[in-house]
Amino acid sequence: LSTVSNKTEEWIISKGKELNEKYYKTIKEIKRICDKNNIEWVLYKTHKYIDEVVDGDIDLFVKEEDFQKFLDAFEREGFECEEDEPGKGKCEKLDFLVVEPHITISWRGGNYFNSNDLWKNLISLKYQDVEFKGISFEIETVALLAKVYFEPEYLDLQGLKFIQFFQKNYFSEKTLYSFPVFKNSLFHLYENLETLKDKAPFFLGNLHFLLFWSKAFLKHGVSFKVYLLHLIFFIYWKYRYLLINKLPFTHNWKKI
């Protein structure tokens, strides 16, 4: 058992190192291509406040007028690009992480943020020798909280730690009232988080989820099919975890 555990740990560490190297390579390439084509961009979600935390893609925002220009510029550099959802792209190239440009923050066809707000109070970031801009800590925190309602419908320990970090250093409760769709729901969630400490994952209560879900989808006209699918995912992931203590893991990594 010890040997198996050590092998697994070694594999996880090596995979993390590989993804971090790709992260650096991809961030550097994003900056080069955008500078070359005079495209403004700002990083979203994927800055490594914890260096060991890895992911398989890099999310960023571009302005609406630059969205197609961004896709075209990356295609000229050998990336395969597509607009896989309205206002969201995906650019892929061997040996790079997936680059996902967004115009605004949206979930399944519903836009809940004013895209102009995303460009306010930007912060300066640096990863190794690459300097770039990131969205404000307020937007980062609200978006993290809001994901609980859309995807993946729970908060893991990493998400909770990020929120606690932002709460302590940068966040004000008044920020929650800047987003009318979320106002009461986010405040309720925020208060719950105060009592969680390191308890993870965090799932919403069924009634709370259903009330918010109905309000959000009815207001934004998302199809009933999407509404139903997300309801099913919420129930499946929550009770799967409660019954067998297992969360979804969607990375397409080869098993040892």
Image: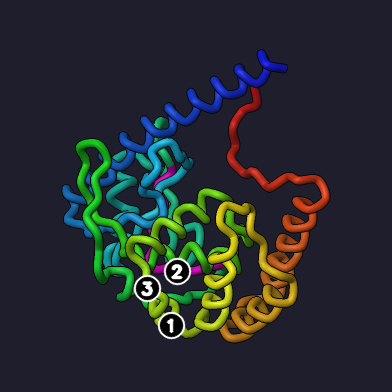
Q: Which of the 4 image quadrants contains residue 251?
A: top right
Badge 2 marks a residue whose secondary structure is helix
Please say whether residue 102 is one of the residues in the magenta stretch: yes
Mark 3 lies on residue: 172
Quadrant containing the N terminus in the rendered view = top right
Q: Overall secondary structure of the magenta stretch?
A: strand
Picture layout, residue 50 above or below residue 2: below
- Please tell me which residue is depicted at 24% across the width and 45% down the height of the picture: 126
* Alpha-carbon span between mark 2 and mark 1: 10 Å
C-beta proximity under 8 Å, tags 3 and 1? no
Mark 1 lies on residue: 177
Q: Is residue 25 left or right of residue 221?
A: left
Picture layout, residue 28 above or below residue 40: above
Badge 3 marks a residue whose secondary structure is loop
Amino acid tagged 1: Tyr
From the image, state whether disc 3 or disc 1 is nearer to you.
3
Q: Which of the 4 image quadrants contains residue 133?
A: bottom left
From which residue to which does the magenta span run? 98-107
| Residue 26: x %, y % from top left | 33, 39
Q: Is residue 92 left or right of residue 240?
A: left
C-beta proximity under 8 Å, tags 3 and 2? no
Please say whether residue 83 is one of the residues in the magenta stretch: no
The numbered disc on residue 22 is none
* Alpha-carbon span between mark 3 and mark 1: 10 Å
Quadrant containing the C terminus in the rendered view = top right
| Residue 46: x %, y % from top left | 40, 50
Q: Is the residue marked by circle 3 packed among few (<14), some (14-19), or many (20+) residues within 10 Å?
A: few
Circle nearer the N terminus (3, 1)? 3
